[in-house]
Image: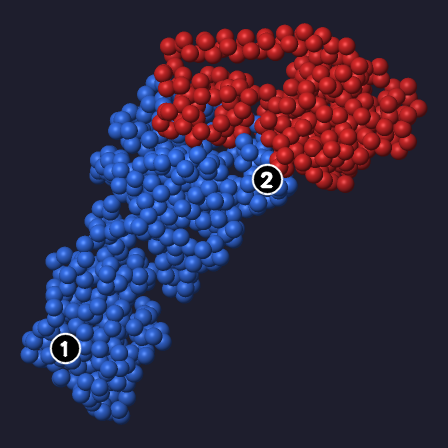
C-alpha cells in the first residue's frame, strides 16, 4: 500500500517542501530509501526500525520503499526520521489511511522511540504556513520555536507512540503547557558606567549603536577597549518582531536556539576569536551553514585584536559590509545569507601597543614595525569603517574620580531608542533600518543639511581631501548625531563632530603632522 | 628642474670642512648650493618617530639658529630632521640636506615641499650618483657627511642605539662638538640624549647655549624681545577670539582650555573646560577650520598654527 506525508529540507536559508512517500508490498523483506539522499537521511531506516521495535510496533516483513520527492533535490539532516516512520505506519495500515493528508512532519527518532530536537524548525514552520498545511508535527523540544509562527496548527510530540495514539484514537499527548520566557527579559551584569574615562570612545559607541555604523577602537593595552565592547550589548536598541523572526530563523538553522530562548529576544553580539578560519566567518560546509557574519545579522560582530586576524579572513568582510549579505558558491549551488551587522573592531596601534600620537615617548617599535602592523588591515576594509576613535591611556584622575564615569547603560539605551524611533519613522515604507544603510542616491532625501553644515562639509571636502565614499560616510554619521539630539536638520555642529571620527589616515601611523 | 652638479674633491667648491677629513667621498652630487665654509654650521638630528614636543623643539632651534646666521645641516628625514630644516627656512636661513640615495630622489616622499624649498634656499647633497635608491645600508655612511659638514651636532630626540647616535660617533671621531637637548628620565625618546649628556655632551637648554659655543655674539635682548613679542601676539589672538561673537560660549571655553605649548585630547579638554564631549569635538573642528588651532597629531589639539608643518604632497 502507498502513503505519503509532507516534510521539508533546508538548503542554506531556504526551505523546500518534500513529499515523503512510502510503499509497502509483498516481496523479499527489504527497506530501500531513494531520492537524492545523503548518508544522514539514509540512516533513518535503521533508527526507524529500532524505534518501532522498542515501542512494540513491528516493521512488516515486506518490501518497503521510501522515496523523498522532488527526487533531484539534495536532502540532508536527520529531520526526516519522523515523516518516514509516519509514512510507513500509514502504508502498512497501523494508522488510518487518509490521516496524513495535508500533514507536515519533521523530527529525529532515537532508538528508544523518542522524538529528539532538531534544528531549523522556525523556517520550516514559516514554510508550512506558506504551503498551507493542516497540521505541523514537530518534536516537543521545538514546540515554542514552532509556535512563534502565528495561526499555524502545531502538534508537538515527544515519542513515536504518541503519534500512533493521536492518529488512531485522536488522543492528544498530555503535557504541562509551555510558558515561553519573556524574550525582552535580559539582565546584564556589566554597565557602561563601569568604564573610567574614555569619553570619546563611549560617545562613538553611542553613535555607532544608534545608527548602526561600523566602529574601530584603537588604543593602548589596558585602556578599556575590550571592556567597552563587552558593554555594547547593554545599549543595543530593541528588536522589532520582524527582526526577531529574521534573526531567529538564522539561529534556528544553526541549531543555536534552546528551551530558554526559542526566539531571539536580543540583538546578537558575536565575538569570534582571531584564529577563526575564513569559512567560519563567511559560512562553510558542503551545504553552507551560516557563518559569523550571518550569526551577527542585525547585531554586532566584535573583532578584538583586529590586526591579529588572518588577512584572508578579514578580506571576506568587504563584500558583506557593502552588500549586507553574503553569497557563497558551492558545487551544489549558490547560497545567500543575510549579513547586515555592526562591525565593532578593536586593535592596538602598534606591536608594543604604546604608540600614541601625543605620548610617543613610551613606544619602542621601529617605524617599519608600525607600518607593517598597520598594513595588516587593508585600505578597502579601513574605508568601510564609519567611526574611528583613539582610546588614550587612562589617567589616574579618571580612575579615582568618583561618579566621573558618565551615563549608565539604561540612560544611554533610552537615548539610543529615541534615535532609533526617529530612524524607524524616517524609513517607514522602505527596506532600510538604520542611517548607515542610506544609499548614496537617497542621501539628499533623508539628510537635509542646514546652510552652515553644507559649508562646513564643503570646507572639509576641499581641505581634507575627502573621497566620495567618505563624504557620504560623514553625512550618514552626522545624520545619526542629529537624531541623537532630536534635530530634524543636520546642523554645522553635527558635521563638525562627525568629522572628528574620520578614519585613521596614513599619517597617523607615520607620526606625521597634518 | 635645476641641474645636478658633480663636485670632485679637487674642485675648490668642495666643502672645506669635508676636505680636511679622511674617508670623505671623492665626488659629491649637489642640487642647489653647498654649505659655505665661512659660515658656522650646526647639524640638527633626531628620531623620525618623535613626539610633538620634540618636533616643535627642533623647529624652534632651527629657526633661532638660522636667524643668527647659522646654516642648518640635516638628513631631511621625517620627524626631527625635517622640522629643524623647516624651522631654519622659516627663520630666513639656509639649510642643507644630505641624502642617502641620489639627490634627484626625494626621500621620504612626504617631504616633497621641503625638498623644493631646500633646493631654493640651501641645497641637497649626496655621495651617491643620481638615481640611487634609498637602501638601508646607505644611511649610516650618509651620517658621516652630516657631521663632517657641521661644527656642532645637536641631537634633539633620540632613542638609545638609534641612527642619531651613529652621527654622534662620527662627529666625535671627526673632532666636532656634540650637544643634546635634555629630556625626562624614562622617556624612551630622550634616553639617547640623556646618555650623551652623561657622557659629557653640551646641554642644549636653549638656542643661546649652542650660539654661545659657536662664539656668536647674539643680542640677548633681541631674544627676550622676540619672546615677549610672541607672548604679545598670542594674547592679542586670544583676545580677538574671546571677544568674537561668531564663537559660542562653549567654543571659547574650549579654546581657553587649550595650550600653546602642549597638545591635549578631546577627553582632556572636555574635563578641563567642563563642556560636554560632543560639543568639544564639534568646537574643535570649527576652531580648526578657522585656523586658530591645529592638530599636531590625530585627536590632539593645540593653539596656534602648526610649526614645522610638512604637508604630504599626495
Residue toward you, A445 or A384: A384
Residue A163 visible: yes
Which residue position holds label 2? A363
Q: Mark 1 lies on which chain?
A: A
Lateral position of residue B45 relative to residue A369, left or right: right
Which numbered marker is on residue A162? 1
Chain painted in red in the figure: B
Residue toward you, B157 or A119: B157
Give coordinates of residue A85: x percent, y percent. 21, 79
User: Residue at image x 84%, y 14%?
Assistant: B38
Q: Dot 2, crowdedness within 10 Å: few (<14), some or many (≥20)?
A: some
Using the image, determine if residue A160 lies above or below residue A242.
Answer: below
User: Residue at image x 69%, y 33%?
Assistant: B194
Residue B76 visible: no
Q: Do the residues labelled 2 and 1 touch (CB within 8 Å)?
A: no
Could you say which quadrant of the image residue A16 lies in?
A: bottom left
Using the image, determine if residue B211 lies above or below residue A277.
Answer: above
User: Residue at image x 45%, y 49%?
Assistant: A304
Q: Which chain carries label 2?
A: A
Give coordinates of residue A113: x percent, y percent. 22, 80
Give coordinates of residue B271: x percent, y percent. 40, 28
Which SS class for mark 2?
loop
Camera-near label (2 vs 1) is 2
Using the image, determine if residue A227 lies above or below residue A89.
Answer: above
Amino acid at each position: 500500500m502507498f502513503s505519503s506525508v509532507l516534510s521539508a529540507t533546508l538548503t542554506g536559508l531556504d526551505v523546500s517542501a518534500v513529499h515523503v512517500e512510502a510503499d509497502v508490498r509483498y516481496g523479499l523483506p527489504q527497506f530501500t530509501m531513494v531520492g537524492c539522499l545523503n548518508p544522514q537521511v539514509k540512516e533513518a531506516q535503521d533508527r526507524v526500525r529500532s524505534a518501532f521495535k522498542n515501542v512494540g510496533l513491528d516493521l512488516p516483513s515486506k518490501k518497503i520503499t521510501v522515496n523523498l520527492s522532488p527526487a533531484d533535490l539534495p536532502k540532508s539532516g536527520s529531520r526526516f526520521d519522523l515523516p518516514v516512520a509516519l509514512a510507513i505506519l500509514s502504508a502498512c495500515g497501523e494508522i488510518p489511511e487518509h490521516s496524513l493528508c495535508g500533514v507536515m512532519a519533521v523530527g529525529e527518532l532515537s532508538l528508544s522511540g523518542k522524538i529528539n530536537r532538531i534544528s531549523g524548525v522556525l523556517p520550516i514552520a514559516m514554510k508550512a504556513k506558506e504551503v498551507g498545511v493542516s497540521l505541523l508535527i514537530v518534536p516537543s523540544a521545538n514546540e515554542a520555536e514552532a509556535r512563534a509562527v502565528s495561526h499555524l496548527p502545531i502538534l508537538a510530540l515527544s515519542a513515536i507512540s504518541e503519534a500512533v495514539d493521536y492518529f488512531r484514537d485522536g488522543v492528544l499527548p498530555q503535557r504541562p503547557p509551555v510558558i515561553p520566557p519573556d524574550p525582552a527579559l535580559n539582565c546584564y551584569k556589566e554597565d557602561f558606567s563601569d568604564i573610567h574615562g574614555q569619553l570619546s570612545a563611549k560617545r562613538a559607541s553611542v553613535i555607532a549603536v544608534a545608527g548602526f555604523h561600523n566602529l574601530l577602537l584603537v588604543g593602548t593595552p589596558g585602556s578599556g577597549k575590550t571592556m567597552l565592547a563587552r558593554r555594547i550589548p547593554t545599549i543595543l536598541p530593541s528588536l522589532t518582531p520582524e527582526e526577531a523572526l529574521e534573526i531567529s530563523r538564522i539561529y534556528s538553522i544553526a541549531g543555536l536556539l534552546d528551551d530558554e530562548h526559542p526566539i531571539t529576544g536580543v540583538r546578537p553580539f558575536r565575538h569570534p576569536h582571531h584564529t577563526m578560519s575564513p569559512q567560519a566567518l563567511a559560512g562553510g560546509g558542503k551545504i553552507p551553514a551560516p557563518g559569523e557574519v550571518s550569526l551577527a545579522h542585525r547585531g554586532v560582530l566584535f573583532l578584538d585584536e583586529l590586526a591579529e586576524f588572518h588577512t584572508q579572513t578579514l578580506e571576506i568582510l568587504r563584500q558583506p559590509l557593502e552588500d549586507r549579505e553574503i553569497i557563497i558558491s558551492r558545487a551544489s549551488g549558490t547560497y545567500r545569507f543575510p549579513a547586515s551587522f555592526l562591525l565593532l573592531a578593536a586593535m592596538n596601534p602598534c606591536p608594543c601597543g604604546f604608540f600614541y600620537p601625543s605620548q610617543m615617548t613610551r613606544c619602542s617599535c621601529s617605524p617599519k614595525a608600525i607600518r607593517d602592523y598597520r598594513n595588516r588591515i587593508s585600505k578597502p576594509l579601513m574605508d568601510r569603517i564609519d567611526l574611528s576613535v583613539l582610546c588614550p591611556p587612562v589617567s589616574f584622575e579618571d580612575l579615582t574620580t568618583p561618579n566621573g564615569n558618565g551615563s549608565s547603560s539604561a540612560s544611554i539605551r533610552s537615548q539610543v531608542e529615541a534615535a532609533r524611533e526617529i530612524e524607524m519613522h524616517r524609513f517607514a515604507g522602505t527596506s532600510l533600518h538604520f542611517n548607515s544603510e542610506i544609499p548614496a542616491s537617497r542621501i539628499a532625501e533623508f539628510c537635509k543639511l542646514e546652510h552652515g553644515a553644507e559649508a562646513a562639509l564643503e570646507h572639509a571636502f576641499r581641505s581634507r581631501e575627502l573621497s566620495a565614499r567618505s563624504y557620504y560616510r560623514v553625512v550618514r554619521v552626522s545624520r545619526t548625531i542629529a537624531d541623537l539630539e532630536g534635530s530634524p536638520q543636520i546642523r554645522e555642529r553635527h558635521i563638525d563632530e562627525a568629522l572628528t571620527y574620520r578614519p585613521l589616515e596614513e599619517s597617523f601611523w607615520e607620526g606625521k603632522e597634518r | 628642474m635645476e641641474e645636478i652638479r658633480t663636485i670632485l674633491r679637487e674642485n675648490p667648491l668642495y666643502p672645506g670642512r669635508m676636505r680636511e677629513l679622511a674617508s670623505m667621498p671623492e665626488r659629491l652630487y649637489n642640487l642647489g648650493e653647498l654649505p659655505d665654509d665661512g659660515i658656522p654650521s650646526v647639524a640638527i638630528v633626531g628620531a623620525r618617530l618623535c613626539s610633538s614636543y620634540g618636533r616643535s623643539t627642533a623647529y624652534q632651534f632651527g629657526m633661532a639658529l638660522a636667524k643668527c646666521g647659522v646654516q642648518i645641516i640635516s638628513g631631511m628625514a621625517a620627524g626631527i630632521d625635517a622640522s629643524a630644516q623647516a624651522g631654519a627656512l622659516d627663520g630666513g636661513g639656509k639649510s642643507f640636506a644630505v641624502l642617502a640615495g641620489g639627490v634627484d630622489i626625494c626621500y621620504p616622499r612626504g617631504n616633497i615641499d621641503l625638498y623644493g624649498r631646500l633646493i631654493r634656499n640651501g641645497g641637497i647633497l649626496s655621495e651617491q650618483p643620481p638615481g640611487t635608491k634609498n637602501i638601508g645600508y646607505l644611511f649610516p655612511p650618509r651620517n658621516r657627511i652630516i657631521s663632517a659638514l657641521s661644527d656642532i651636532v645637536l641631537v634633539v630626540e633620540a632613542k638609545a642605539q638609534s641612527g642619531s647616535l651613529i652621527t654622534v660617533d662620527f662627529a666625535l671621531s671627526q673632532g666636532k662638538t656634540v650637544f643634546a637637548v635634555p629630556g625626562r628620565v624614562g622617556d624612551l625618546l630622550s634616553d639617547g640624549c640623556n646618555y650623551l649628556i652623561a657622557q659629557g655632551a653640551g646641554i642644549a637648554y636653549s638656542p643661546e647655549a649652542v650660539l654661545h659655543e659657536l662664539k656668536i655674539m647674539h643680542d640677548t635682548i633681541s631674544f627676550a624681545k622676540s619672546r615677549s613679542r610672541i607672548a604679545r601676539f598670542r594674547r592679542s589672538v586670544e583676545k580677538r577670539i574671546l571677544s568674537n561673537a561668531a564663537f559660542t560660549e562653549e567654543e571659547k571655553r574650549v579654546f581657553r582650555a587649550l595650550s600653546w605649548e602642549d597638545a591635549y585630547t578631546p577627553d582632556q579638554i572636555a574635563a578641563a573646560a567642563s563642556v560636554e564631549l560632543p560639543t568639544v569635538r564639534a568646537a574643535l573642528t570649527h576652531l580648526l577650520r578657522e585656523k586658530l588651532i591645529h592638530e599636531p597629531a590625530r585627536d590632539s589639539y593645540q593653539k596656534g598654527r602648526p610649526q614645522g608643518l610638512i604637508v604630504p604632497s599626495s
